């Protein structure tokens, strides 16, 4: 579970580098991940998550508890 956001499920995507002469070679697009600690008041504990920038915005908007419950329901967190 190296390059996957634990809130949104975003992972590595594949694509092509395209040169000026339109020559294509394979490349990878990595998500913008951060390792962050969050305080969960319901459990009175800190948890560490690997979260993308979009996941951080999701947590700021909905709250950590709602985001964790949604990620658990979708299977992004075990």
Image (cartoon, rainbow, N blue to C red):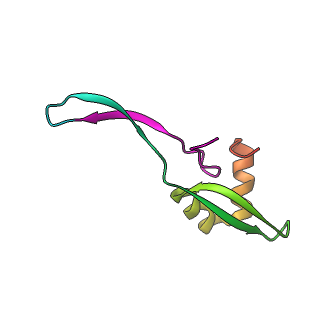
Residue 56 x %, y %: 58, 62
Residue 33 x %, y %: 54, 54
Residue sitting at 84 percent across and 68 percent down? Answer: 42
Which quadrant of the rendered structure holds the C terminus? top right
Answer left or right for 24 relative to 65: left
Q: Residue furthest right?
A: 43
Which quadrant of the rendered structure holds the N terminus? top right
Segment colored magenta: 1-18
Residue 47 x %, y %: 75, 61
Residue sitting at 55 percent across and 64 percent down? Answer: 57
Answer left or right for 67 relative to 25: right
Q: Is residue 54 positioned above or below 5 on the image?
A: below
Q: Is residue 36 positioned above or below 14 on the image?
A: below
Q: Quadrant of residue 36?
A: bottom right
Q: Say whether residue 61 is magenta.
A: no
Q: Say whether residue 5 is magenta.
A: yes
- Front residue of 17/56: it is 17
Residue sitting at 54 percent across and 42 percent down? Answer: 11
Q: Quadrant of residue 49?
A: bottom right
Residue sitting at 68 percent across and 65 percent down? Answer: 37
Answer left or right for 4 relative to 44: left
Residue 50 x %, y %: 63, 54
Q: Residue furthest left?
A: 21
Q: Is residue 3 positioned above or below 34 on the image?
A: above
- Front residue of 66/32: it is 32
Answer left or right for 54 relative to 7: left
């Amino acid at each position: 579970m190296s390059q996957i956001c634990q809130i949104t499920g975003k992972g590595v995507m594949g694509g092509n580098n395209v040169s000026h002469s339109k020559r294509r070679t394979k490349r990878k697009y990595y998500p913008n991940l951060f390792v962050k600690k969050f305080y969960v008041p319901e459990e009175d504990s800190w948890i560490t998550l690997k979260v993308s920038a979009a996941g951080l915005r999701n947590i700021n908007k909905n709250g950590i508890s709602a985001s964790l419950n949604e990620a658990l329901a979708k299977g992004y967190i075990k």
